[in-house]
Image (tube, grey):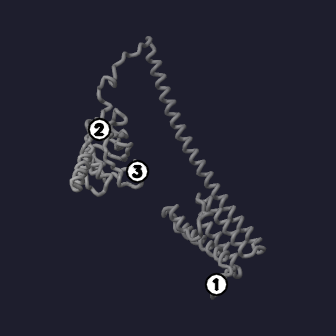
Amino acid sequence: MKKLLIIIFKIMIIFSLYAQSDESQVTIPKRIYVGDTVELRYVFYSAVDFFADTDDKASALDVDLTTIGFETETDDYTITKASFSRNELQYTFSMMFVPWRTGELQFPPLDIAAVVRADGTSSFFLNFLPVSVSSVLQNNSDTAIRASAGPLLLPGTMYALYAILLVSVILLILLIRLVARWRHLYDAYKKRKLLRAYVKNAKDLLRGLRKLERNGSRMDDGAFCAAFQHMIRKYLDFRIGYHFTTVSTSSIMETFDTIMAGTMSERKQSAIMSLVAVMRRTDYIRYARGSIDSERQPADQYAAKFGKDERLSLIHMMRDAVERFEG
């Protein structure tokens, strides 16, 4: 008896998988032309729980186009997106596509059970109706262009109309040239303004370096390094248009490569390498003070403090880097 009930239950499942009823299909928009983005909605009712194997018993999912079982890009159409959802016993399959020719489009049957379930134990096919794609040149009753009667003109007004037309064309040409010229002048003005801002930004850094050179002896090594790095990062923020104040020293070179996409000249690359060397040295002095590493030998390489004339050397290195980068 138990085996008989199991067999009956399996037969009911198979029957429900293949039984389709109350199917409907609509397209949005209803009237379709070549190149339109169209949504095809296929609605049907079924007692089968297609979402039984999905996470959290979902009621909607985006369909992976590689699983629908037929080509999504052909000479006739391109399918861009698909989704599947349910509302109790009602299921809706939605497919976005772009038609590329007029006439009837016929999509192949879709096994929705195979799309939702990866085990492929059963099938449930959606049989799409043909989709009609209209032509804008079709001489339909609602789109036909009807001939109209010519305008009635007073005698002698034709020459005046020709003159007005000629003047209008000349004025239109002058207006187009003026707009094009104005755009060119505006772009040139913006470029000059940006270049002046870059020059001012570089001068501000060089002015700050001179001030640091004069007054740096009054600061301890940590304060000197902090002020030095603040000037450099502020310069880079404006010059590159990126928040280098949030970029670690070890990531500066990689960040430059990403922003510039390999377009930097060797001169500018050399300048950035010098800048990074200055940043690493000042980082080491700021954060390695009192560490075991700072006690290693030789002291001129590992000591977390400036050597004789090292501050002046770093300032000169930064000036040279700015000149190479701006040159």
Q: Which residue is drawn at 49% across and 62% down?
A: 261
Reading the chain from its start, which is encountered first: label 3 or label 1?
3
In the image: residue 113, left or right of residue 275: left
Q: In this view, does 41 lie above or below 243?
A: above
Percent coordinates x, y for residue 183 in the rendering? 55, 42
Q: Quadrant of the N terminus?
A: bottom left
Pointer 2 residue = 23
Toward the front, the furthest residue is 1
Q: How crowded is mark 2: few (under 14 residues within 10 Å), some or many (20 or more)?
A: some
| Residue 223 as seen in the image, left or right of residue 48 | right
Residue 58: which disc? 3
- Whether tag 3 and tag 2 are in contact, CB under 8 A, the answer is no
Residue type, label 2: Glu
The mark tally for this picture is 3
Camera-side mark, 3 or 1: 3
Q: What element carries label 2?
A: strand
Question: What residue would you read off at disc 1?
Answer: 292
Q: Quick one: 129 or 157, which is closer to the camera?
A: 129
Q: What residue type is labelled 3?
A: Ala
Q: Tell me the quadrant of the picture where the C terminus can be found.
A: bottom right
How would you rate the neighbour count of disc 3 (Cα within 10 Å): few for under 14, some for 14-19, many for 20 or more?
A: few
